[in-house]
Amino acid sequence: MAIKISLGPVLYYWSEEQLRTFYRQVATAPVDIVYLGETICSKRRSLSSEQWIEIGHELQAAGKEVVLSTLALLEAESELKQLRKICKQENFLVEANDLAAVNIRSKAATPFVVGHSINLYNQATLALLARAGMSRWVLPVELSRETLSALQQDRPEGIETEVFGWGRLPLAYAARCYTARHHGLPKDECELRCLDDPDGMVLKTKEGQPFLTLNGVQTQSAQHHNLIGAVDEMTTLGVDIVRISPQSHFTMEVVQLFDQVRREVMSGAAGKEATARYLPYGGVDGYWYGKAGIE
Amino acid sequence: MEQNRQPSELTNRPQLPPFLSAPLQLVPDLIHTQLLVRVLNHLFKQPLQEGELDFLESRTAVIRLLDGGVEFRFTKGRKKLVAHSGSSSVDLAISGNLYDFIQLSLGKEDPDTLFFQRRIRLEGDVELGLEIKNLLYGLELDSLTMPTPLRKLVRGAVDHYQNRITTP
Amino acid sequence: MMELVCPAGNLPSLKAAVDQGADAVYIGFKDETNARNFAGLNFNSRNIERGIEYAHQRGTRVFAAINTFPQPNGWHRWTDAVDLAAESGIDAVILADLGLLEYAAQRWPEMNLHLSVQGSATNYESIDFLHRTFGISRAVIPRVLSAAQVRHLAEHSPIPLELFGFGSLCVMVEGRCLLSSYATGRSPNTYGACSPGSHVEWIERPDGGTETRLGGILVDRFEANEAAGYPTICKGRFEVEGKEGYAIEEPTSLNTLELLPEMMSMGIGAVKIEGRQRSPAYVAQVTQVWREAIDRCQRDPEGFQVEPRWNAALSKVAEGAQTTLGAYQRTWQ
């Protein structure tokens, strides 16, 4: 069976209208799994959890598997409260991006996906989380195909593997909001300025090289991680799902290209060539080959 | 809110009085270096035996005394450190004023502090620099066999000099 | 009793910390099993025993940080490190990886397990998971929470917390920062070094200025009269939409001396000093100040005031020669 395509959660702050338009397109796109919800900042509330669930049902009706994704950095009690609410709902599977969600779901004996911000680097961790109720894991983005291959060999039965295959790489999470800092505002009075940056803000070196993307409390790469050329290899390694991280432009075009490659209508190399026009600062795939991410 | 902000401009860079550092220039560099490596081989006797200096093999480091106008080039031979003559390229350059090197070698100043203040500068193979720096940290200075009267004399001189620059 | 936990990258530093009154000293081994894997630093099996002996004779505890994440091909190096620590009579191991926590809990059931800051625990639900799964007895908390959030966390955590008091400031959640990895391919998580020396370039320019690069990426350019920093990406100067400056963080150090009474009232178990990569002179200076401050605060928390000479001594050894309360103070965030 061909590898499945998933659409990761939207990592940026988009308006309600932008989100609704986007997910209307997703309903008819060749993706199998859709991750919904806010994973970066609890102040971003274009949609309430009820509205997310409503979109989830619409996508489910369109034949998609829906997963509710959760915050990666949980600090305040209000954030834990919201997390418990998502973990308790029974409509959809939940993606844990912090051990807090693992704790809540495993105590309730309900399954969960382990997202790429939880450090699953070896077989012992894989087995342990599987026993705690994990049904799927996403390869941490800095790990290579060699590590993946070793983990696949010892993967417990019934566990699915997902790989982050397209998008700006999630690189770090912080106390500080860099968008607010850029505008000279304290984090508590940020005026939700990241709403102006549907793909984050590019950070360049003093010699003008695009290097990172600032997205509120998250730092991403400026370059797009692009594994369309490795879809074949992933299939060989028994990877079940390849993830595409939504961007404000051309996400559907990229989904189409991944779909053609997985159906072997197009070669990986041709796919790589075709995606080049959707990469404002170029593509990288170093992590997959055990090198620096920026290579 | 940041506290204890200090000026980032570096105004106070102690130097030894020229009459102390100047005579160094009168002696050819290679002779300094041969003296230096002899002292270093003495200090690093145990680490050398345990192979902890093997990382220096076939790599050349240079220590530049900016106010003394001299430099010491050395590398590791089969068994011990040797002076490196010739003008081939160096892997690592550590430069600073004599005063700061004395402070460092006596363990009176934290090397990173001097480094952050740019009183000691590293160029070239930074990993080699870190390795040398960390090796120096790891030496137990009080157990070193620098003759006590000499050590007291040097410490006294540095204290005296430090007092002169901090209490004008 | 709030414990003072001090760093030691080698034997002289360990002795300096013990002599200046640290309650505990933390160390690492000479490989990628710890998060300060720098050339020439750390302990081998011979001097770990000497260090533990020196410390125990003087009533100081010793912890071993084995706080990076093993991958399948290196798994045994990490379990060997846990075994070596246990067999040497270590008082606690500081771990981050879930698999390794499980190994240590099963193989050495009597040993104290601390969660490393690399374990990224910022809330009590995650601490609860680690406590009930592995029986950890302490958690070191990333430097990302405000004082009010720390208080709330301390109230709800099933185990005591250890907070950073002083040292270079990570602004990212540790264990989840890939900035250095992205530029160099050597990750703090797996290789144990942020900005490894092998990928750092320090270039003096003809005009007296300096350029620092990491993996070829220009991290900063300094004028001749500017203080320079070691090139960590988060403390570099960059351009964002036409504004040039420290987009992520200034090169400052964390200093929470003035929060001591508050930390004590929260019941914080320990204060940690950063800096295993620094010299014995640094360890001695910082330990001395914090010992005096903690003792003073324990005797009289209401009357506690920070002595200017303490801050002066700490500022002198601080990265960037400035200090900040960091995230503990909300306005910083």
Image (cartoon, coloured by chain):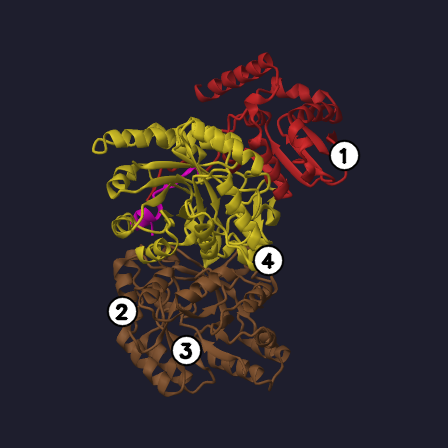
- Quarter of the image containing the C terminus of chain B? top left
Number of residues whose C-alpha sits closer than 10 Å to that of mark 1, classed few (under 14), some (14–19) or many (20 or more): few
- Which three-letter amino acid code belongs to the residue tagged 1? Arg
Please give the residue where the numbered disc 3 appears in the rendered image. A34
User: Which chain: yellow?
Assistant: C
- Which three-letter amino acid code belongs to the residue tagged 2? Lys
Q: Is residue C284 visible?
A: no
Residue that appears at 58% across and 67% down: A149
Please give the residue where the numbered disc 2 appears in the rendered image. A85
Q: Is residue C103 left or right of residue C263?
A: right
Q: Is residue A141 left or right of residue C127?
A: right
Please give the residue where the numbered disc 1 appears in the rendered image. B78
Residue closer to the observer: B94 or C123: C123
Q: Disc 2 to disc 1, how far (Cα)?
A: 68 Å
- Which three-letter amino acid code belongs to the residue tagged 4? Asn
- Under tag 3, what secondary structure? strand
Q: Position of residue B141 (x, y in %)?
A: 56, 24
User: What colour is chain B?
Assistant: red
